[in-house]
Image (cartoon, grey):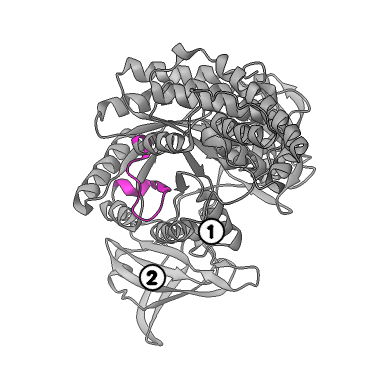
Amino acid sequence: MAGAFDALHKSVSALRTKARAADDALVVDDFSDADALASARNFAAYVSIRGTDIRDLQRELHRRGLSSLGRIESHALDSLERVSSILARLANRPVECADERAIGYDAGEEILARRTMQLLGPRPEKRTPRIMVTMPSDAAQRYDLVRDLLAAGMQVVRINCAHDEPSCWAAIVRHARRASQELERSCTIVCDLPGPKLRTGPIETGPGVIRWRGFKNAYGELIAPARIWISAGAPATDAAHAVLPVNPEFIAHLSPGDEVHFRDHQGRARWIVVESVGGGGAWAVAARGAFMVQGIELSVRRNGQDAGVVGRVGEIPPQPRAIELKIGDVLWLTRDSVLGRPAQMDAAGTGMLDAQIGCTLPEVLGAALPGHRLYLDDGKIAAVVEQVLPDRLRLRVTWTRSGTVRLASEKGINLPDTHLNVPSLPPADLVALDFVAAQRGMIDGVGMSFVRDAADVNALYQELDARRLDVGVILKIETATAFANLPPIILTALRRNKVGVMIARGDLGVEVGFERMAELQEEIASLCAAAHLPVVWATQVLESLAKKGMPSRAEVSDVVLAARTQCVMLNKGPHLVAAVCFLADVLERMEGHQDKHFRLLRALRVAQTHASRFP
């Protein structure tokens, strides 16, 4: 029996020696305080361990009733020390002195809890994860929306500085602070820096057409109607799926419960039901889709009878056209100044012109090479670069999510094979940082987009120091390059204690392939846990609920995974308040069900890549 334990002792001791060497290799002067140094040491030890496949060792330890080393992130070296000590006694070997630098489980959890509170605010009463919400644009005009979100369970307000103007951001800040005081609830405000804007450019406008549709499940059953704002010019007070322009007299005769009947542009009999009237318009819901153009006649039925109220659809401004694409199509990627357009006949009517779309980041045109992959609109369209010209790229569509898809302006572009030599903090980021400085004391943190390496983190810290800003930092991991460089990014980030990581799963999934996304999000969360860094679980969380009013089963399962992190982010949608309530309830129910899973630790490629730094 002692012989079996002797072999296990040798294996664990080898891991411990490796972890101690990684600790010795750290430059302790790089870290400002005891917490930062303790986290860096634990992180170095953990990365060194994850450079080795220890699954067989784990199984054998588990068989012997010992720790499987499956949950050692927050106290890696300490766990090895303890298991090695037990095995030494069982193998009748001398017990080595423990490394005093090893941080224990309680100390590691305390650092993580303290850092999470500093970055994201106090822990909610009944759960660990905070809820972060990306503010929609109308939050600048709607104090009630911000208040309702905070009352529903939101703790962190995220202002996306890639959209709107500083005046809108300032209004949201005021609303959040007012709501926090009124409800006596903590509210952390984070401004997300825009980063290099890599999106599709504007497209030629087409006829004025309004389109809406109800939302149905796989069985064709209605799960949420479209919300229509009927208006004579007043802006919508909430998120609308469509805005229907009419004359003021028509709105004056509307009442809740009225049915507005019409035949749409395709001649189909349709109606919408008025829910409320006020604020210069009326809210209505539509169970069935419709195409609307200027001049369509509208009539009102009240209590099943003709109410004698008639109106017409007013002027609809020209709408941006979408570009329809399918596998095999050619798409030219041009400079942003060139308007996009669908494929069409040339002026002479003798041949077809390929579709084209602009790119907001002209550096792409000089960096991409033939054979490089390119993804559009969150991966709904995949293409490959066929030809590179001085001012454009010829792309061939290789995959679409469903037959023919529509590409619009302002959609994301991902180039996982292309190195873009662009500044990590473009001018728009500096404008946003100046806004944060002007709002000193009102804003608690900033989010950095498009992090690629440790130099990008240093660049942000320098800008914060230049403005004397002592705010938290959330680093968005959204590219394959950022994941590959995650260990040095984390060590650099630990120069500050108010710092965390956001797993931006949408862009990251597009870049690395969705088949690897589940694996990578777990690896990122584990590496951050080893550094005692709070993690924000982001992108498409309960998206169907926020946008359509009903979550999918997969989204609920996704929330269960998110419950292991320190913060979960929701994006905007018409049903955002309901989504926050639902998320808060699920997270509370999951409290106490986490950290109970035996995990196998195969070797991490990212750990092996940085093996020289963590010997």
Residue 231 shown left or right of residue 346 in the figure:
left
Q: Tell me the tag on residue 250.
A: none
Q: Residue furthest left?
A: 182
Q: Which residues are magenta?
A: 118-140
Check disc 2: other Cα within 10 Å, few if <14, some if 14-19, many if 20+.
some
Q: Is residue 97 magenta?
A: no
Q: Is residue 79 visible?
A: yes
Residue 131: give x, y in percent of width and height.
41, 49
Q: Residue furthest front?
A: 92
Q: Tell me the tag on residue 544.
A: 1
* Position of the N terminus by quadrant: top right
Q: Nearer the viewer, residue 176 or 198?
A: 176
Q: Nearer the viewer, residue 498 or 189?
A: 498
Above or below: residue 65 compared with residue 264: above
Q: Disc 2 designates what residue? A: 311
Residue 298: give x, y in percent of width and height.
43, 72
* Position of the C terminus by quadrant: top right
> Earlier along the polypeptide chain: callout 1 or callout 2?
2
Residue 60 shown left or right of residue 174 in the figure:
right
- Disc 1 element: helix
Residue 381: give x, y in percent of width and height.
69, 43
- For the residue marked with disc 2, what is the amino acid? Gly
- For the residue marked with disc 1, what is the amino acid? Ser
Q: Quadrant of residue 574?
A: bottom left
Q: Nearer the viewer, residue 158 or 126?
A: 126
Q: Is residue 347 visible?
A: no
The residue shown at (28%, 37%) is: 170
